[in-house]
Image (cartoon, rainbow, N blue to C red):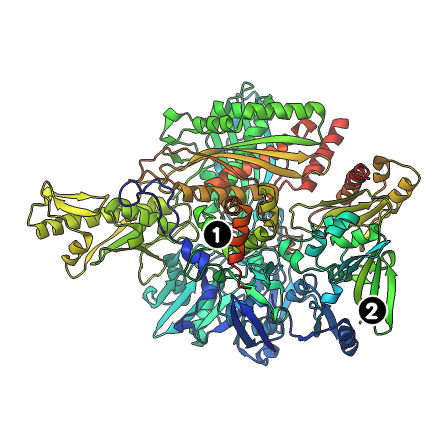
Amino acid sequence: MKVELTVNGEQVAADVEDRMLLVHYLRDVAGLTATNVGCDTTSCGACTVLLDGESVKSCTLLAAQAGGSSVTTVEGLAAADGTLHPVQQAFREQHGLQCGFCTPGMVMAIVSLLRENPNPTEEQVRSGLEGNLCRCTGYHNIVKAALAVGCLSGEESTAAAASGSAE
Amino acid sequence: MIPAQFSYRRAASAGEAIDLAAEYGEDAKFLAGGHSLLPLMKLRLALPEVVIDIGRLRDLSYITDGGDHIAVGALTRHHDLEHSELLARELPLLAHAAGQVGDPQIRHRGTIGGSLAHGDPASDLPAVVLALDATLIARGPGGEREIPSGEFFDSLFETALRPGDLLTEIRIPKPAARGWSFQKFTKRAMDWAIVGVAVQGNAVGLVNMGETPLRASAAERALASGAGPAEAAALAADGTHPPADINASREYREHLARVLAGRALQEAAARA
Amino acid sequence: MDGDRAGAVGNGVLGSRVLRVEDQRLLTVGGTYVDDLDIPELAGAARVTFVRSPVAHAMVTGVDASAARGEPGVIAVLTGEDAPPAEDKPMAEPLLATDRVRFVGEPVAMVITDGRYQGEDAAELVSVDYEPLPAVASLDKALADETLLFPAAGTNVIAAAGAEDSTGDALFEGCDVVVGATIMNQRLAPVPLEVRGAAAAWADGRLTVWASTQNSQIARFQVAGTLGLPPDAVRIITPDVGGGFGAKIGADRDQIAVGWAAKHLGRPLRWSETRSENLVAMTHGRSQRQDIRIGGTSDGRILAYRMDFVQDSGAYIRGDYLPGLTRLMASGSYLIPKVECSYKFVVTSTTPIAAYRGAGRPEATAAVERAVDLFAARIGMDPAEVRRLNLVPPDRFPYTSPTGATYDTGDYVAALDKVLAAAGYSELRAEQAARRERGDRVQLGLGLSTYVEITAGDGGGESGRIDIHEDGTATVFTGSSAHGQGHDTSWSMLVQAELGIPMKDVTVIHGDTDAIPTGTGTFGSRSLQLGGAAVHKAAGEVKEQARTLAATLAGANEEDMEFDPRTGIWRVHGASGTELEWGKIAGAAGPDGLTADVMFTADSPTFPFGAHLAVVEVDTETGKATLVRHVTVDDAGTLVNPMIAEGQRHGGIAQGAAQALLEEVVYDADGNPLTGTLADYAIITATELPSFELLDSQTPTGINPLGVKGIGEAGTIGSTPAVQNAVIDAVAHLGVRHIDMPTTPQRVWAAITDAAKEGAR
């Protein structure tokens, strides 16, 4: 069947099997391989992207379900001139990544979390990341990165978080 | 990791969804948020030949004040239940429990209808709708019918929904007794409850204490005859048949049910 | 900017929190892991899906692939009949099972399809006939030798050592108090976020394998050896690797099978397993049953310690180094006059066991730390005091332990004291006492560990090569193989510090055996002290060559040439206007350019050490334990990049705490895995962890010129016993003396309930 969606602001269309998972559509059809598959039980969150601005686990969506919607992956976060999104910048400054495999999903989960709660407490960040597994960092610096972005004034961080969306 | 092959159909209306389901019969399953069905399909434990996507039926996503009750559309997402101001005022038990389901990503997709229709006794919302004495509205080829929550859950993954039935609404009477509590016990925050207890007034729903969500009837009877939280909680596991698995033995689940019921009833009393 | 740090160039960069050069790419376009590769060599590659045994132990009496072969998109189905046979040696492991399977998940066939989705469909259609045999799913079953996994071997015992040296009860002569226990260091799954994967192409008489591995050079020899190819005919390329933790050392059996199949079919292939496969077919870690016995005086001196253990190997031998490492580190950081340690190493019908962060040392540390706490509890002394009394004092280094490990440098008492002070130990004990007095439902537990661990224990060296280019930039070729450790950053820092070439002008290459044919790779926390030291050594040789070249260019004597590592400039001493940049010097080098290619070997391993204090709260009604604070010293000598070192500690602490609290691979009596998905295998999340409190301590070693030891596994080794001891401590006043890991709520509740029953008697 034909599945068309907007990914990082660009129209993508392809004829795919009905059962194609959104994560494979993004990786194999749209060629955006930053989003990773880390499990098969919707546990790990490595596949997290934004669907119409909200975080979802793209391994547990059919591409067909996302047809007509707008998807944002980590590749769509930085500005056109290469300026990093505040969450990306914070990850770098706080050493929030090591092997990088969980990172795209982790970043997108935090972008969504901060949209809904621009100035979270540490506890809120930690429970907000219950669906994102990392084996390298022990989460310590990931949490620091999220809190660092949250420390921007409410107005600034909302604008900053919104600037990464390709809606 | 990959579902077996199937055909995808998207329904543009509830009526179309029901017609498609009638056309394909037992070979078809409705797909709402997909976070109960797709995980099973990916492990090839569910093998529908046709998947009818009802996820875009926005007119089945609502939370409205019906005077003496709150009407919740079956396709209302957990995220929307969690953040609803109306629910925070009138049905905080439902709002709070919805915020405990899975993780934020799952809550952006999963729906109350999908969760209830899935019929998993380890899910959070089935025990909640039991404790809230909700009525479930289903629409099928033969028309609409109302199913009391107490008659909705038949057995493990089996509900009173007939093939082709579409769950459309959950109607919840505004509770007279305002005290509430939801106690979900897990090893990790993202796990299914090892045991959970949902309390609204003197109603006590149990998560994962049997093949279906259950009411802690013995505890409820004790409360009705004037017993305090501790006394009633001691009876919370009576009449239950909890599973034994790598997380908990039967005995440990029974113990947890009693402990959590005690805490839930105390907290509800403090909120009353 | 990459390598950003105020006032960056030249000396002074070492020891700074330089931001990673890897991150820009990883954060914007993502890493290129093996499943992401989009290269001409793999154009049109077919997909591999394995058919795996669903039974733990069975004879394979037939494989019928006819239905699969008939499906659209199926190119071939390969079985054990097609694959190279196992080596002719005891307990050999084949690529594909032939007549017998020995663990759930063992590969039996490979289905080759056009597409990934078709692979899963076709694999279901391969029909394998199994005649089940009794499972050997426990250590006792293995030791009983009633059912043999390898009849030709005559036993399930691979090896045994140390029992012959036992002095029996005489070991504890003179002890006022002797206390013992049988404890379990449970089986774990490494769960790197990136599962196993490989791609392979056979062309022009060479096999290229792109592998998610920690050691491309070792992998090359393994692939070549198994396929009967000369090493030159094999090239291993390591793309980005999403975590390894020891489970991606060398080439995995299934990766070698992919390489073989690509050659066999003459078709490029790609393979990426599912997580469910990963949880049963990637090697597991730990799985030791330990009998510990400790004795000493009633005023706290430990006089003797015995540790006898059974090491589970799983179905094949992938980690034969493990029990020896445990034995080597058995006495930990203590000065114990008499220590005996013995082991048996057995096969079981379960997933093979190999290295997993710590590889043999966490097991040793967890055992001795438990023993010390048991001893402290028996004599009624605070476990911190007992440790202080018995730690190897700072004036005893280098210290050789009774089991033959020579610890280079350390100050164990200082580490302990630092942690206790920073944590506010006496206030915490007071809080604990107050809660016990009140009978609070939520009790406080404090758990300590003082540990020493062996890094670069393999005794091998590491390669390093630096090329200086005519444009003044440099390329480093390292045998090390980062999979999250930030070597590109640290090696660039070393080049900037030694040669004054800015980090942004340094490129680090690893993982391609054509570019780096000699090397060992990354495991055992060896990379900085060997690979980094090799970069340092190569830099030194480059400077030697440069001095000669610069002198020639300047028309001066070599001894008059001076070099400023802050600016990277050579000049004639005292003569302005004679400045020479690296590019100029490189341009003057001979036909091979300005380059140095070295091997760095050290005379011995190094021994980082530390102390951990874990603070837990236990809900005594439900048994649930929550880690609320974790304070550590992890001393790995001089720190090149403290930020990266902290990250390694964080990750280690999390994995170690996860072993203590949550994780366990569980098999039923028939050898069926019960924790085969990430929904069941409880890997720890951010919600269950606090932010950690890391203290700084740098006690350099003299073993290498950088003064560095390894940090990668120390956090894991230190944290597990601290957290386990804390949970037990929280309920010790209720009569609990031990709880096996993981200290799940049910286990804690059962321990409390059992202790209450015993108390009531």
Please state, as top left, top right, bottom left or bottom right, where the N terminus of chain B lies in the image: bottom right
Q: Residues within 10 Å of mark 2 (few under 14, many from 20)?
A: many
Q: Residues within 10 Å of mark 1 (few under 14, many from 20)?
A: many
Assess whether mark 2 and mark 1 are in contact (beta carbons under 8 angstroms): no
Q: Amino acid at mark 2?
A: Arg
Q: Looking at the rendered structure, which numbered label has been put on residue C3?
A: none
Quick check: C165 left or right of C464?
right
C511 shown above or below C77: above
What SS does tag 1 mark?
helix
C453 shown above or below B66: above
Quick check: C547 left or right of B98?
left
Residue at label 1?
A86
The residue lying toward the viewer, choosing from C613 and C309, is C613
Residue at label 2?
B139
Residue at horizontal 61 percent and vertical 73 percent from the top: C121
List the single residue furthest toward the top: C299
Quick check: B24 left or right of C44?
right
Quick check: C256 left or right of B188?
left
Chain designation of label 2: B
Return the x and y of residue C65 as percentages of the image width and height.
Answer: 59, 76
